[in-house]
Amino acid sequence: LTTTIIVFILYFLVMLGIGFFSFRNTNDEKDYWIAGGNLGWAIGGASIASTQMSAGLFIGTIGIMHTVGWSFGWVVLVFPISYWFMVAVIAPKFTKVKKNTLPDFIETRYYSKSARVIAAIIILVTFIVYIQAQIVAGGLIANIVFGIPSEQGMILFTIILLVYCVIGGMMAVMYTDFIQMMVMIFGAVIAVPLAIRHFGNIGDLFAYTQAVKPFTFTWDGMPPAMLFTLGLAFLLGAVARPEQLVRFYTMKDMKTIRKGILFTIILVGVAHFFVFFLSLTTPVLFPALPTGDLAMPMLASAVLPSFIGAILLAAVASAMMSTVDSVLLVAGSALSHDIYQPLINQNASEKKKIWVGRIGVVISGVVPVVLLLLGVGKGELVQMMVALFSALMASCFLMPVVLGVLWKRTTKEGAIASMIGGLLAAFTWKMLGYDAIVDPVVAGFVISTLLIVGVSLLTPRPPESALSPFFDEKNSSIPTGTPFGN
Amino acid sequence: MSYVFWGVFVVYGAILAGYLLWMYKIEKSEGGQ
């Protein structure tokens, strides 16, 4: 246990160090929200990958595969597809006018401050759900590592996250994401051979696994129809995540973004496949766990050598933190950059804007934990909470972003109707309990698509001034932002 | 071993290869402009 605590203290110190380094290099709003907008492909790609892979990968995914077998692993295919779509279809136009946040983009494309504020409010509300899911995992890790009650663990992780996010902004988030990604890869890669050695060799592992769960390598654990629905929810939700889209703004140009996404696809693949192998070991080692979510923490604390177990736990913490820091920053930007500034104080100085941003990040971090401590949002499988978040993202932002860059006829009224209608549809679907039959993403996506197309066609065409920055090919120098590409 | 096991590696690899090819084509066409 001492080894684990030392590993974690070192890990926390590195995160805080990066926070202070970034603090010294943050001079204006652009630095604070998009790390200056000049990052390279390695930091950008690793950050997208580590933000994508949350505690859900190490705890929820292992938990589900522990229960249903290998077939669930096919869901991983949605990630390279969604990244490819993002970089090929969305990024080229999305980054033509370099902004600080997704609601910023929505205001520019939909010529409407109201649309921006509505997007920001939706982000704030939905991100609380997501931060809660991740913080629960943090509490679980702290409970294992430090032996403290999970409530205290949640507070501990929130404080560490808040310190480096609040002071260092996006620069701290991107650089810590990179380190956290490396810890995740290292942890997963090093744990697999040791876990397999426990059984003999890989052939023995397969034999044991199939003896305990004969359906492990069949579609019986998770039938293709169910897999398809779940994959669809992940795919639709992955394409329009505000915390991922904003990463396109942090990278230098389209060439950097394309390379970054290649790196992302490789990292996501490697991390997932190694984690999948870990999930094969747990049904044999712990056949009678009360919940699959405990499989990974048990593996790290009871099976692996203490140092490797510590690294694996640090990897899980990294997965959680690299997601929460990004989400926190986007929630903070929604509150201060997209709600406070346009509505209350439009003429604040750069310095004041950064500090208002910091206050926004603090509020976005404290609220989910307080809600959790009050007992709101506890008790569901982590992965299922993450799945609802995906559905909400897809229902609100997918069509306004995708049609915003593809279809000139999309109007602000259409976008606003789509965001609100999509959110309500997905949420109502879940509340009515229909999510057991069909994922809420389907309801949300269908309603948001119908609304954006229908309302856009019924309302006046967008003004040319709102479209030309995104659609005018001759317009290579955009007055309101940094020109992109060659 | 069942294709449920190895199939996912093959498909992931195929998507990665497709992406590389696409990236190469874009870079080539941008370089030629």
Image: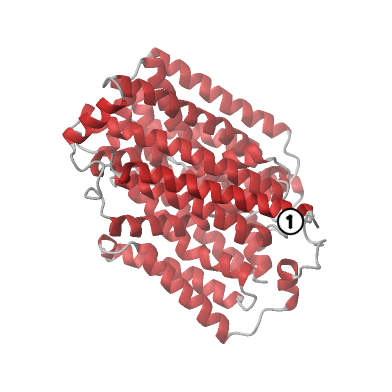
Give me the residue at 39% from left, 42% from top: A56
Q: Is residue A243 left or right of residue A372?
A: right
- Element under disc 1: helix
Image location of residue A470, percent across then percent down: 71, 67
Between A482 and B33, the residue placed more toward the observer is B33
Residue occupied by mark 1: B29
Q: Is residue A225 left or right of residue A112?
A: left
Image location of residue A320, percent across then percent down: 45, 37
Let me know if residue A292 appears in the view. yes
Q: Quadrant of residue A372?
A: top left
Give me the residue at 76% from left, 70% from top: A472
Give me the residue at 50% from left, 50% from top: B15
Disc 1 residue type (three-letter): Ser
Q: How many marks?
A: 1
Q: Is residue A428 above or below residue A462?
A: above
Let me know if residue A376 appears in the view. no
